[in-house]
Amino acid sequence: MTAIPLRADTLDLIGNTPLVRLAGPSEAAGCDIFGKCEFANPGASVKDRAALYIVRDAEARGELKPGGTVVEGTAGNTGIGIALVANALGYRTIIVMPDNQSKEKMDTLRALGAELVTVPPTKYSDANHFVHTSRRLAEETEGAIWANQFDNTANRKAHIEGTAKELWEQMEGRIDGFTCAAGTGGTIAGVGMGLKQFDETVTIALTDPHGAALYDYYAHGELKSEGSSVAEGIGQGRITGNLEGAPIDTQFRISDEEGLEWVRRLLREEGLCLGLSSGINVAGAVALGRQLKAQGHEDPRVATILCDTGFRYLSTLYNADWLRSKDLPVFDWLEGAA
Ligand code: PMP
């Protein structure tokens, strides 16, 4: 008998990801830090979960019909998830992306058969922002739905019913803290809400990159941003529909340098190749572990999200020239490489 279940179809491969204890972060925090391996999803990111829930929800509401089209604006990972889910269910995919995101994500979307539209990066208030462009395209396309991951709460439902429940089971009900960064906010809000249903004393912390406005919002009630980050997929400037009512107890602000140091260490010391949002999340988890210890928890157990694979950033995070161009430290083994 095998303990690894047979999955009934390919969409069943989404979710039920492994959870791993991270040795370096645990040592740094002085308590156990766990990472949920979302890069193990078929599309190699946490966003496969939201993609599946959004598509299934649109079908259930009768909006998405056979032969229909799914349109979405995305930093890339949600698009990759939607393209795979849509392929599996027989839908067409149109993805709108800002053109400053990694080339790997654009190449991947085209390879999966999505129709890719790129737009210049602009402020959310600009009419040509990728989110508004995708909404217009959906309105103009016969038989299309707009996935609307930022405000469609089918996104966070994927994490209430999936990620949070899995974490609770994998940690056998012994979890003291959870933290991650927010893009749409679906993960932090959904995991936070889901874990609080099991145990309302679990501390939910937002980990915000520089340049995002949520740290100030949860700390002082004001949306305010300072600085910037090269991390893709995170860094939110408004309270999205998914963030409304999110049970955030505390917050940390993490720099790209701190996040990159964990990306470097997790690769070289633990053999995990991750994107920068994962490194920022791990830095936040270490900060949360230390805070819980300082508050008197003897042996807190903290979980975070390892959001996507580093293979998606070979031309950026793992490229010496690119790192130098952003004034970021170059990984020593890349030093001397072009
Ligand atoms: N990390 C990466 C790499 C992502 O693409 C995203 C999604 N935009 C996130 C983190 C954040 O997830 P969420 O949208 O659930 O806040």
Image: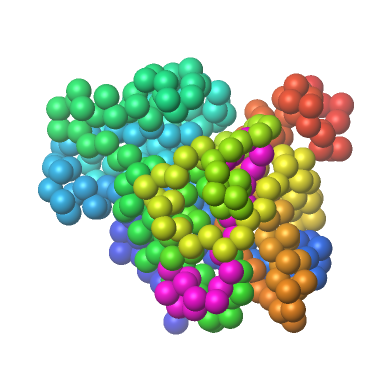
Left or right side of 248 for 67 = left
Q: Is residue 329 left or right of residue 98?
A: right
Q: Is residue 31 magenta?
A: no
**Quarter residue 149 falls in:** top left
At 59% across and 75% down in the image, what residue appears? Answer: 175
Task: State whether residue 229 is above or below residue 241.
Answer: above
Q: Is residue 335 left or right of residue 227?
A: right
Can the viewer see residue 320? no
241 vs 157: above or below: above
- Residue at 81% x, 37% y: name it: 331
- Looking at the picture, how far across and down is residue 38, in whole percent? 53, 55
Q: Name the image colouring.
A: rainbow
Quadrant, the N terminus: bottom left
Q: Residue 307 or 86: which is nearer the viewer?
A: 307
Q: Eyeballing the image, is 160 above or below 112?
A: below
Q: What is the quadrant of the C terminus in the image?
A: top right
Q: Viewer-proximal residue, 117 or 225?
A: 225
Percent position of residue 250, x then y: 61, 60
Report whether 273 appears left or right of 132.
Answer: right
Q: Quadrant of residue 116?
A: top left
Taking depth in this image into account, of 13 and 162 the one nearest to the observer is 162
Residue 13: percent from left, percent from top: 40, 58
Kindly identify the residue that appears in the image at 50 percent across and 43 percent down: 183
Residue 200 falls within the magenta-colored stretch? yes
Asked whether the viewer can see residue 247, the reply is: yes
Q: Which residues are magenta?
A: 194-213
Closer to the camera in the image, 168 or 311: 168
